[in-house]
Amino acid sequence: MLLYHDPRAPNPRRVRMFFAEKGVAYDTIEVSIATAANETPEFRKKNPIALLPVLELEDGKVLRESVAICRYVEDLHPEPNLFGTDAWERAQIEQWNRHAELELLWPVQQVFRNTHEYWKGRIHQVPEFADVMREHLAARYAWFDKELAQRPYLAGERFTVADITAACAIDFARVAKIRIDVAAQPNLAAWKARIDERPSSKA
Ligand SMILES: N[C@@H](CCC(=O)N[C@@H](CS)C(=O)NCC(=O)O)C(=O)O
C-alpha cells in the first residue's frame, strides 16, 4: 500500500496513526500542500478534488477518504479492533468519530484556512467565519471535557478511531493558536495526555 500524504496535515496523520496502531507496513509519497503539489494534473488523477490522504493499492485502485481508508485496513487487519465489535459499540464509535470530525476537525481546518498566512493569496479567506468557528470550538472543547469526565476514551472504556480523529484535530488546532485550557478542561487535558503516551501519536 502506498499513502500519499503531507506530514503536517491532520487528515493524513489520522491514517498514519491508525496504521501505526494496526502495525501495518506501507510506503509513503509526500505531496506538499504548501507547494500545491496536490493540485497538479498528475495528483488530480488520484484525487480529482486534490485532497490528502490518498491510499493506492498494489493494483492501482485508490481510496481518498480517511475513514474509508481506515475501514479498509480494519477489515484486512481486524486486530486491534478500532471500529467496534458489536452493534452498540460500533454505533458509539461511529457517533464519536463523526463528532470529532464535524465538531472539532472541520471547524479547526476552517480557522486555519480563513486566517493563516499559509493560505493568504491562495484561497478566498473570510476571517469573520474563522471567528464563528473559534466560538464554536470553545463550546465544543468544553463539551468534550464534560464527556471525558465520565470515561477514559471518547467512545467508552477503550481507545478507538474516534480518539485518533479528535487528537489529530486538537494537535492541529495549535497552528491556529487554539489550545486546551488545562485548568478549565482537566478531563480533556488528561485524555490528551493518555493519547500522547501511545507510540502511534508520533506518526
Ligand atoms: N474528508 C477528507 C478531508 C481531506 C482533507 O481535508 N485534506 C486536507 C489536509 S488535512 C487537504 O488535502 N487540503 C489540501 C487543500 O485544501 O488544498 C478526509 O477525511 O480524508
Image (cartoon, rainbow, N blue to C red):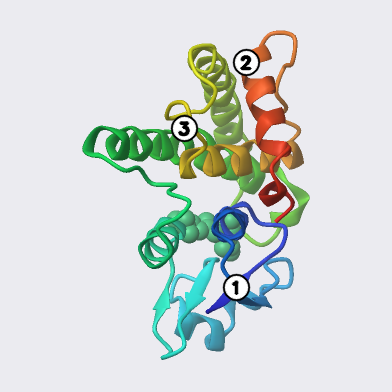
Residue under numbered circle 3: 103
* Residue 11 image point, x, y percent: 56, 55
In the picture, the quarter occupied by the C terminus is bottom right
Name which residue lies at 67% across and 51% down.
Answer: 200
* Residue 96 image point, x, y percent: 41, 33
* Residue 131 image point, x, y percent: 61, 28
Amino acid type at mark 1: Ala
From mark 3 to mark 2, how far is it between C-alphas?
Answer: 18 Å
Name which residue lies at 73% across and 37% down.
Answer: 197
Amino acid type at mark 2: Asn
The label nearer to you, 1 versus 3, is 1
Confirm whether residue 64 shows in the render.
yes
Q: Tell me the SS state at disc 1.
A: loop
Residue 187, numbered circle = 2
Query: Does the beta carbon at disc 2 come under 8 Å from ligand 1?
Result: no
Q: Tell me the SS state at disc 2.
A: helix
In depth, the one of 169 and 81 nearer the eye is 81
From mark 2 to mark 1, how far is it between C-alphas?
Answer: 34 Å
Confirm whether residue 126 shows in the render.
no
In depth, the one of 160 and 42 nearer the eye is 160
Query: Does the beta carbon at disc 3 come under 8 Å from ligand 1?
Result: no
Name which residue lies at 49% across and 74% down.
Answer: 55
- Mark 3 neighbour class, 10 Å CA radius: few under 14, some 14 to 19, many 20 or more: many
Amino acid type at mark 3: Glu
* Residue 101 image point, x, y percent: 46, 41
Quarter assignment of residue 52? bottom right
Name which residue lies at 39% across and 68% down.
Answer: 76
The label nearer to you, 2 versus 1, is 1
- Mark 1 neighbour class, 10 Å CA radius: few under 14, some 14 to 19, many 20 or more: few
Does label 1 or label 3 sit earlier along the sequence? 1
Residue 195 as seen in the image, left or right of residue 68: right
Residue 25, numbered circle = 1
